[in-house]
Image: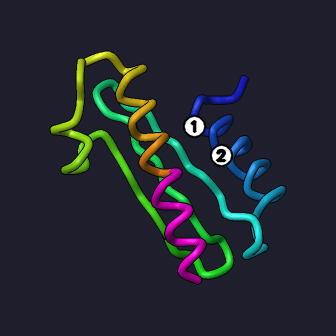
Amino acid sequence: MRTVQKRFEIRTKRVRSKISRTSIRLRLCVTKSNKHIYAQIINDVEYKTLVSVSTRSEGIYSEKKSNCNKDKAFIVGERIGELAKKSVLTK
């Protein structure tokens, strides 16, 4: 039986192999901890994070309406979408 870490590495390699090495297709990485939600848009060709948003971000932290993770995730999703559009249009 595989350990949790090994299964995570296998899944990560599988996903990245399908979408990596192309600048046309950017990768969205979403991480959830017990308290916060993080989202990043990554360009795998240049190995750079283009946009990153989390519930710890200054504008979102004060904007929270409740402590519900669903509300926080919705706000993070909206903000990452707005920033992604701006960053893609400026290039």
Q: Secondary structure at mark 2?
A: helix
Provide the residue span drawn in magenta.
81-91
Image coordinates of residue 27 in percent, x first then y, are 65, 58
- The residue that appears at 57% across and 64% down in the rendered structure is 42
- The residue that appears at 16% across and 38% down in the rendered structure is 62
Q: Is residue 59 above or below residue 26?
A: above
Q: At label 2, which amino acid type do we have?
A: Glu
Residue 9, numbered circle: 2
As drawn, the residue found furthest toward the left would be 62
The answer to whether residue 89 is left or right of residue 20 is left
Image coordinates of residue 20 in percent, x first then y, are 75, 65
The answer to whether residue 25 is left or right of residue 83 is right
Residue 43, numbered circle: none
The answer to whether residue 89 is left or right of residue 76 is right
Quarter of the image for the N terminus: give it.
Answer: top right
- The residue that appears at 51% across and 71% down in the rendered structure is 87
Mark 1 in CB contact with mark 2 (< 8 angstroms): yes
Image coordinates of residue 39 in percent, x first then y, are 46, 48
Q: Secondary structure at mark 1?
A: helix
Image coordinates of residue 15 in percent, x first then y, are 75, 49
